[in-house]
């Protein structure tokens, strides 16, 4: 798309819902998601003249949105402190004294490509992510969905790499256990 074909008047109609849904998954707060999208569109409008056309209009807007989501987390970090350790220090898997699991994980027997298209799985995953403690959800989304590097997450949340690994491990295990209850057993 070239610079002349940018049409900021149509951004909300073309991309508003996509931008909002993308943001909502990442911040889990409808009001914050709406505000971030508005700030994104305003920033894009202000930067409209600097658009060089090296990417599509949609990609350009999503690039701005990703930065605004990170800005949102930075603001939260300044105004809100939270302990990155879980409330209870238990692992979702029960281990035997010798270190082996008491019960093996369920074999999901699914094709990853088909699973990605499964709307029931998507709904179950969203519900399970909502059940994660906020600190786990934030870090999990930044790492696994946004693809942010571990170094950036550690700097952003002021945690050591080993603590980050533990948080991600526990988040994944909690999601796995939740999905086994709310999706795998119902399929």
Image (tube, rainbow, N blue to C red):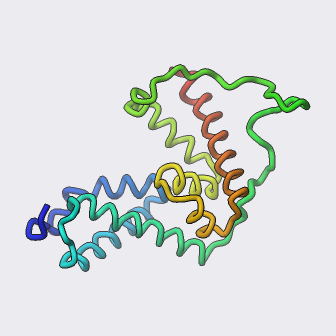
Residue 90: image location, x then y, percent:
80, 44
* Residue occupying image coordinates x 80% and y 32%: 94
Residue 57: image location, x then y, percent:
21, 62
Q: Quadrant of the N terminus?
A: bottom left
* Residue occupying image coordinates x 61% and y 69%: 155
The number of numbered discs placed on residues in the rendered structure image is 0
Residue 100: image location, x then y, percent:
82, 28
- Quarter of image, res 183: top right
Up the image or down, 42 lies above or below 143; here it is: below
Up the image or down, 126 lies above or below 97; here it is: below
15 left or right, relative to 163: left
Farthest-out residue, right: 97
- Quarter of image, res 42: bottom left
Farthest-out residue, left: 4
* Residue occupying image coordinates x 56% and y 47%: 130
Residue 165: image location, x then y, percent:
68, 52
- Quarter of image, res 154: bottom right
Up the image or down, 34 lies above or below 25; here it is: below
17 left or right, relative to 173: left
* Residue occupying image coordinates x 71% and y 51%: 166
């Amino acid at each position: 798309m070239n610079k002349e074909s940018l049409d900021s008047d149509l951004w909300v109609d073309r991309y508003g819902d996509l931008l909002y849904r993308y943001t909502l998954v990442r911040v889990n707060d409808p009001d914050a998601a709406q505000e971030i999208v508005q700030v994104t569109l305003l920033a894009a409008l202000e930067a409209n003249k600097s658009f060089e056309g090296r990417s599509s209009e949609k990609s350009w807007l999503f690039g701005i949105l990703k930065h605004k989501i990170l800005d949102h987390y930075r603001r939260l970090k300044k105004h809100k402190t939270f302990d990155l350790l879980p409330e209870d220090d238990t692992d979702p898997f029960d281990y035997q004294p010798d270190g082996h699991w008491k019960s093996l994980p369920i074999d999901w027997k699914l094709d990853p490509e088909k699973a990605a298209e499964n709307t029931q799985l998507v709904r179950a995953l969203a519900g399970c992510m909502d059940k994660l403690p906020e600190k786990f959800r934030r870090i999990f989304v930044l790492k696994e969905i946004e693809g942010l590097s571990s170094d950036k997450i550690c700097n952003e949340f002021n945690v050591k790499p080993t603590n980050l690994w533990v948080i991600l491990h526990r988040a994944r295990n909690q999601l796995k256990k939740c999905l086994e209850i709310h999706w795998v057993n119902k399929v």
